[in-house]
Image (cartoon, helix red, strand yellow):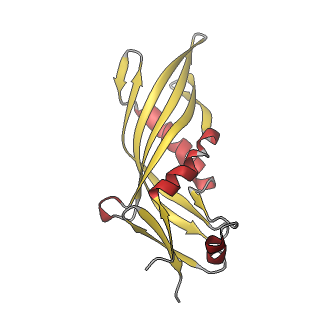
């Protein structure tokens, strides 16, 4: 029995506020590219597995000869959640791209160099930014902060339970 659950809706709501921070300039195939995430949607525990699936929509602005060309990236990812008691937060590790597509004027398909840079951008961001943080202002969550916790995945929710030794 879970002491506390974080639903997909709650997780998606909290992450939506963090997306504005996720932008980076890169060099891809010698061209300057600005990558930024516009939307991320989480599915917790798909098919009974202990992972989160993340669907990400991002924009890349490719600069060529003084002009900027928009590129839309749609990516499906999978990651393992981890609870870190130091800051009472849930982070995602072991991010893997399951599939991706790119849409640009005159091109639709995959482009592996962008996949690798995009995965690196997301890995760096998720290593330093939790997808969920317990809220000290909430009495239930504040109580959870006082005890060691285990994280479990169930379909549609992350469960936090006291660690029993």
Residue 157 against residue 67 in the figure, above or below: below
Q: Residue furthest bottom?
A: 165
Residue that appears at 52% across and 87% down: 164
- Return the residue nearer the eye: 129 or 140: 140
Q: Position of residue 12 (x, y in %)?
A: 50, 51
Q: Residue furthest right?
A: 137
- Return the residue nearer the eye: 116 or 20: 20
Q: Position of residue 86 (x, y in %)?
A: 67, 70
Q: Is residue 146 left or right of residue 155?
A: right
Q: Position of residue 152 (x, y in %)?
A: 44, 71
- Return the residue nearer the eye: 159 or 150: 159
Q: Quadrant of the N terminus?
A: bottom left
Q: Residue furthest left?
A: 47
Residue 114 against residue 89 in the figure, above or below: above
Q: Is residue 113 visible?
A: no
Q: Is residue 104 visible?
A: yes
Q: Position of residue 141 (x, y in %)?
A: 62, 71
Residue that appears at 65% across and 64% down: 135
Q: How many marks?
A: 0
Residue 55 against residue 104 in the figure, above or below: below
Residue that appears at 59% across and 48% down: 125
């Amino acid at each position: 029995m879970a002491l506390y659950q974080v639903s997909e809706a709650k997780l998606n709501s909290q992450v939506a506020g963090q997306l504005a921070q996720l932008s980076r300039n890169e060099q891809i195939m010698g061209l300057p590219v600005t990558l930024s995430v516009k939307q991320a949607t989480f599915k917790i525990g798909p098919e009974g597995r202990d992972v989160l699936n993340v669907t990400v929509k991002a924009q890349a602005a490719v600069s060529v000869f003084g002009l900027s060309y928009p590129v839309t990236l749609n990516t499906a990812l999978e990651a393992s959640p981890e609870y870190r008691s130091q800051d009472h937060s849930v982070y995602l590790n072991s991010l893997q791209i399951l599939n991706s597509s790119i849409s640009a004027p005159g091109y639709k398909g995959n482009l592996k160099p962008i996949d690798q840079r995009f995965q690196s951008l997301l890995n760096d961001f998720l290593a330093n930014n939790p997808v969920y943080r317990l809220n000290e202002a909430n009495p239930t969550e504040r109580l959870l902060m006082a005890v060691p916790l285990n994280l479990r995945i169930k379909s549609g929710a992350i469960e936090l339970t006291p660690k029993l030794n």
